[in-house]
Image (cartoon, rainbow, N blue to C red):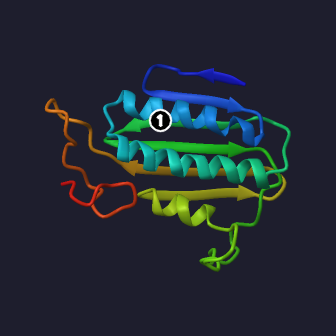
Amino acid sequence: MKHAAADGTSLRLLVPPEARFGKYVRERVAGFATSFGVGPDEAEAFVTAVSEALANAVEHAHANDPIEVTCRFVDERLVATVVDHGVGFETRQRPPKVPNPLAERGRGLLLMKSFSDTFAVRSTPGKGTAVTLARFVGRRNSGGGSAEGRTRGRPGRSPNAH
């Protein structure tokens, strides 16, 4: 497992395709987000989306190569990309349906979308998949509260935040 931060404005992790490394990635991504003054609710929502992308790569890529997780803070947005070099899939398939509420699985893509402002999947059969997601965030101001953000009404955002 490799951990490299290029310049303080980005985070790059190379992790084995094993579920047991999920906690490590979540901790590093949360630390990265909060290092920019992102509030705990926004950081938690971003970490949830990244964690789902990683979990999908671990489960569905069927690859031995490390999974790359990169994060950047750009223009008041947290941006993450999760890349695997696995089996990939045809992206022209139908959009995912909402699973039966009693189903155990099938919510990953929907969760990633709901916790992100932008969400994209690029995949090539036989070559792998890249999931990119971004979330607009408000930095904390000097008074310790959240700065007004563009994220009202989304998951992970306090209902009385402004």
Quadrant holding the C terminus = bottom left
Which quadrant would residue 104 be assigned to in this image? Answer: bottom right
Quick check: 133 left or right of 22?
left
Q: Which element carries disc 1, helix, strand or loop?
A: helix
46 vs 41, nearest the viewer = 41
Instruction: Specify the farthest residue to the front.
Output: 102
Q: What residue type is labelled 1?
A: Ala
Q: Is residue 129 visible?
A: no
Crowdedness of circle 1 by 10 Å Cα count: few (<14), some, many (20+)? some
**Which residue is at 67% across, 36% downward?**
68
* Residue 47 % position (x, y): 50, 44
Quick check: 48 left or right of 124?
left
Q: In this view, does 103 lie above or below 67?
A: below
**Which residue is at 65% across, 56% downward?**
122
44 vs 72, nearest the viewer = 44
56 vs 77, nearest the viewer = 56
Q: Can residue 30 be seen in this view?
A: yes
Instruction: Specify the farthest residue to the left.
Output: 143
Q: In this view, does 2 lie above or below 151?
A: above
* Residue 18 % position (x, y): 78, 40
Quick check: 43 left or right of 75?
right
107 vs 160, nearest the viewer = 160
Q: Is residue 102 above or below residue 83?
A: below
Q: Mark 1 points at which residue?
A: 30
* Residue 72 % position (x, y): 46, 35
* Residue 132 % position (x, y): 55, 50
Quick check: 63 left or right of 29?
right
Looking at the rendered structure, the number of numbered marks drawn on it comes to 1
Which quadrant would residue 103 be assigned to in this image? Answer: bottom right
